[in-house]
Image (spheres, rainbow, N blue to C red):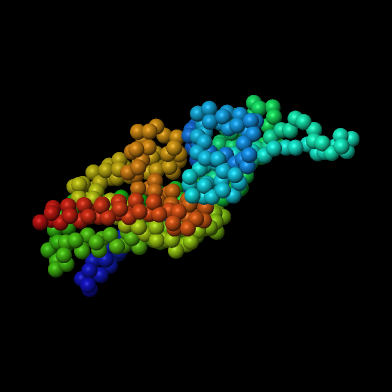
């Protein structure tokens, strides 16, 4: 055990002596958190919409058909109350709700208390505001779709979870997913490949410590660094950017540690394939950077992508982590609501770690 701790201490000192690496590790999160204040928007497609109506009148049915006929909205359910619609949005079964209510004119005494004919409709949008840019677009598209109905009036919107429409609510979980993946996977793979490239890996492997423990010892400092970076991001999100941590901090950390272990496993796998630091960087760029940015839902909604790219994004780990963090941090849901994401991350971690360790052991022998 003392020998293992000695290897951990050796790798930690090696990291701390490299000032450029430390600047990248802790400077990049701060810069991105402060400057990444905008998001690229795309066309709205297939917005899962739930209709709220206690009784469906012909006028309401006409408006529902207008929404369903457009390419922007998909009617997934009809519920009797806004509370039921909010539960569907909270459980990620819908993206927005359209609430219809009949406007009945006030009774006139001169008519003996009878109502005046020609009652209109009032509509309200309840939108998942975790992604403020897309929420605003959904509301705008819905208003434009329903604007042609002269019986419709008094359109209003209500944003859940992010009423101020602040983009920080959206990009903080995304930056967490990107940075933790890049730091853990890229830096771990480069560190191990650097030892092989310089010929010092053979010296380490002839030590009394088992080869796999040597590799684990090199990964431990990056695990600690990743937890430190996670802490920095959460503190900046809460006290600098004003992003609330609505969910359980315990589960946020637990899910993040699972994701960090997944990234470390991926870095180990890359180190098995690459023989030089340049190859490790190229592999990291192809395997990590582009998929994380383009296919994880960080910038572009997965639902708006072509079907083929949606299938490809299903194997991108940050997609599930970012989704889980948005639910836990912004929506404040319990761990049961992110069970699917956590299960996928845990399965990917187990699979990658098993393949990486087995392949590494075979190569060393």
Q: Is residue 260 above or below residue 84?
A: below
Q: Is residue 289 visible?
A: no
Expressed as whole percent of the image width and height from the top left, the position of residue 175 reads 44, 49
Nearer to me, 224 or 48: 48
Residue ID at (68%, 32%): 152
Q: Is residue 356 left or right of residue 181?
A: left
Q: Is residue 100 visible?
A: yes
Considering the image in quadrants, where does the C terminus appear? bottom left
The mark total stands at 0
Q: Is residue 109 above or below residue 25?
A: above
Considering the image in quadrants, where does the N terminus appear? bottom left
Q: Is residue 214 left or right of residue 331?
A: left
Nearer to me, 303 or 91: 91
The quarter of the picture where residue 63 lies is top right
Expressed as whole percent of the image width and height from the top left, the position of residue 86 reads 56, 48
The quarter of the picture where residue 192 lies is bottom left
Nearer to me, 177 or 225: 177
Residue ID at (59%, 49%): 83
Q: Is residue 222 left or right of residue 105?
A: left
Residue ID at (12%, 63%): 206
Residue ID at (30%, 40%): 286
| Residue sitting farthest toward the left | 365
The quarter of the picture where residue 146 lies is top right
| Residue sitting farthest toward the right | 110
Expressed as whole percent of the image width and height from the top left, the position of residue 246 reads 53, 57
| Residue sitting farthest toward the bottom | 2
Nearer to me, 235 or 197: 235
């Amino acid at each position: 055990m003392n020998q293992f701790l000695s290897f951990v201490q050796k790798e930690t000192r090696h990291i701390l002596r490299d000032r450029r690496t430390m600047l990248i590790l802790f400077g990049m999160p701060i810069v991105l958190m402060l400057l990444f204040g905008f998001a690229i928007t795309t066309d709205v497609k297939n917005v899962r919409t739930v209709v709220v109506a206690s009784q469906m009148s012909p006028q309401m049915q006409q408006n529902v058909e207008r929404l369903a006929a457009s390419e922007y909205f998909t009617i997934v359910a009809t519920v009797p109350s806004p509370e039921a619609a909010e539960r569907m949005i909270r459980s990620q079964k819908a993206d927005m709700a359209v609430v219809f209510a009949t406007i009945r004119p006030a009774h006139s005494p001169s008519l003996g208390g009878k109502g005046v004919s020609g009652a209109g409709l009032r509509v309200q949008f309840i939108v998942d505001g975790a992604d403020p840019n897309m929420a605003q677009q959904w509301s705008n598209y819905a208003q434009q779709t329903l604007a042609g109905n002269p019986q419709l009036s008094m359109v209003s919107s209500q944003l859940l979870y992010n009423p101020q429409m602040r983009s920080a609510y959206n990009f903080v979980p995304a930056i967490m997913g990107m940075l933790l993946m890049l730091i853990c996977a890229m830096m771990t793979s480069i560190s191990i490949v650097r030892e092989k490239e310089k010929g010092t890996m053979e010296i380490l492997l002839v030590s009394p410590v088992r080869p796999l423990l040597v590799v684990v010892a090199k990964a431990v400092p990056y695990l600690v660094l990743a937890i430190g970076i996670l802490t920095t991001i959460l503190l900046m999100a809460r006290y600098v950017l004003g992003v609330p941590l609505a969910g359980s901090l315990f589960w946020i950390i637990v899910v993040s540690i699972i994701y960090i272990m997944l990234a470390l496993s991926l870095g180990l796998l890359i180190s098995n394939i690459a023989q030089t630091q340049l190859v490790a960087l190229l592999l990291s760029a192809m395997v990590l950077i582009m998929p994380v940015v383009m296919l994880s839902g960080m910038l572009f909604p997965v639902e708006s992508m072509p079907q083929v790219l949606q299938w490809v994004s299903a194997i991108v780990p940050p997609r599930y982590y970012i989704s889980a963090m948005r639910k836990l941090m912004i929506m404040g849901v319990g761990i049961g609501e992110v069970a699917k994401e956590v299960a996928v991350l845990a399965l990917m971690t187990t699979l990658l770690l098993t393949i990486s360790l087995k392949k590494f052991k075979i190569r060393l022998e």
